[in-house]
Amino acid sequence: MRRVHYAWMQHNRPVHLDRSELVDLTCELIEIDSIGGTPGEQRIQEHLAEAARGEGWEVHTWAIDVAGTAARPGFPGMEVTRTQALGVLARIRGAGGGRTLLIDGHTDVVPPGDRDAWDADPFLPRLAEVNGQPSIIGRGACDMKAGLAAAWQAARMVRRSGIELRGDILIAPVSGEEDGGLGTYALIEELARSGITPDGCVVPEPTNLDLVPANAGALTFRLRVPGAAVHASRRSEGVSAIEKFVPLLAALEELEAVRNAKVDPLMDRWPLAYPLSIGTVSAGDWASTVPDLLVAEGRLGVALDEDTDHARAALEEAVAHASARDPWLRDHPATVEWWGGQFASGRTDPTDAIIETVRRAASNRIGCDPEIYGGPYGSDLRLLTGLAGIPTVQFGPGDTSYAHAPNEHVVIEDVVTCAVTLADVIVDFCR
């Protein structure tokens, strides 16, 4: 069995990472088809709760009141139907007097999409070379089961080393991140009820082993464009909702350009820091009828530190102004609905202890300072910082360009590096 040696000694023995064990754990998680809103989402939570008990960790589970939680004024939204969800919190207690580290990782994944675009079953994990690098392929490999497995393995390593920590390690697998953040929202409530206040949090989302202390937000919207139905042979006597969508789409493209004209320095690396995109379009119910309604659903990027109400107002005003310029839409304006995931932006002070701890550990492992930048996507970071006031940074293996894509994969060496780095973080932060 190949072993990667760890850099510090305990009782004159090297502490090592079991590479095969880490790969097996990642594959084990990928095999559970934990698509949001399906039974697999509950099953992987139960699986990890039982696995944590097998490690000898304290495990607290609770049934999340989905309906009650979703009714809260600050609930971040949901895009799939759920009747149940399970909260899981594993705790490794320290001797006392040290800082508490929370590791928060989502277990839900997006659907695999067109299965013919995959080389094999998306939930059959396999090892293969991708771009010349040994990798793990499968839905959730990158986003973010490898990162969660790396954090889990890091906690194992520290426990097996015999090092005595003063602070606690908390590992929270959470559901529902992909469509809003149900699991982390419920976790924050549970931590408050339990009187637990983490001093810092690492979310091992895919960052290419860089540090992401900030995220843009993302608001899901639905646009309804009215028309007037008529037989297609009398097209000129009706109004096509599809044609009326064209000036609205142009107005949204113009809005996107305006909102990206000047961005926060943390977001400079992205060609589009705050994208505005249309994801689905549906119109008409008969080929020979002029469509009287078009429904488009999309996603509006929220700038760092921007209030979500301000972002919503900007899109609503753009739609209203475009409607006012069109003779038909002036009297039959398009309407905007806000539904599904409502991700605010969020950030952690770059001088906070958790960021410096991760930066130092990553620099030692990688051999150079990791880049520090903001992500153009929403994540649970904004709930942890905004609702709970927990300083949070994202750090994990994988490239987000492979997340949600066919043949999603993660480079094994990056998963290994992440695990040993997080072990360093645990020792440094909690000792």
Image (tube, rainbow, N blue to C red):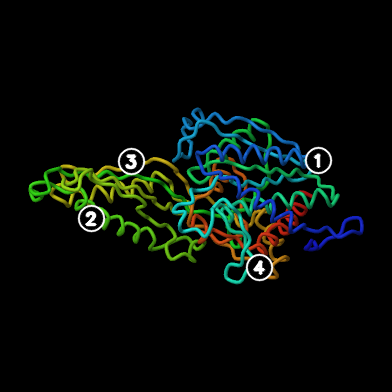
Above or below: residue 62 compared with residue 3? above
Ranked by sequence position, the earlier of labels 1 and 2 is 1
Ranked by sequence position, the earlier of labels 3 and 2 is 2
Q: Quadrant of the N terminus?
A: bottom right
- Between disc 3 and disc 2, the foreground one is 2
Residue drawn at (79%, 51%), measured in percent from left and top? 158
- What is the CA distance from the residue labelled 1 to the residue labelled 2? 62 Å
Ranked by sequence position, the earlier of labels 3 and 1 is 1
Query: What residue type is disc 2 on?
Result: Val
Q: Quickly name the residue at label 1.
A: 96
Q: Is residue 335 left or right of residue 13?
A: left
Kindly tell me whether residue 13 is visible in this rendering: yes
- What is the CA distance from the residue labelled 3 to the residue labelled 1? 49 Å
Q: Are marks 3 and 4 in contact (CB under 8 Å)?
A: no
Query: What residue type is disc 4 on?
Result: Asp
Residue drawn at (78%, 63%), measured in percent from left and top? 2
Q: Quickly name the residue at label 2.
A: 246
Q: Quickly name the residue at label 3.
A: 337
Q: Quickly name the residue at label 4.
A: 369
Ranked by sequence position, the earlier of labels 3 and 4 is 3
Q: Are marks 1 and 2 in contact (CB under 8 Å)?
A: no
Query: What residue type is disc 3 on?
Result: Glu
Q: Residue 256 placed where, x, y %? A: 35, 58
Ranked by sequence position, the earlier of labels 2 and 4 is 2
Query: What residue type is disc 1 on?
Result: Gly
Q: Residue 204 placed where, x, y %? A: 62, 53
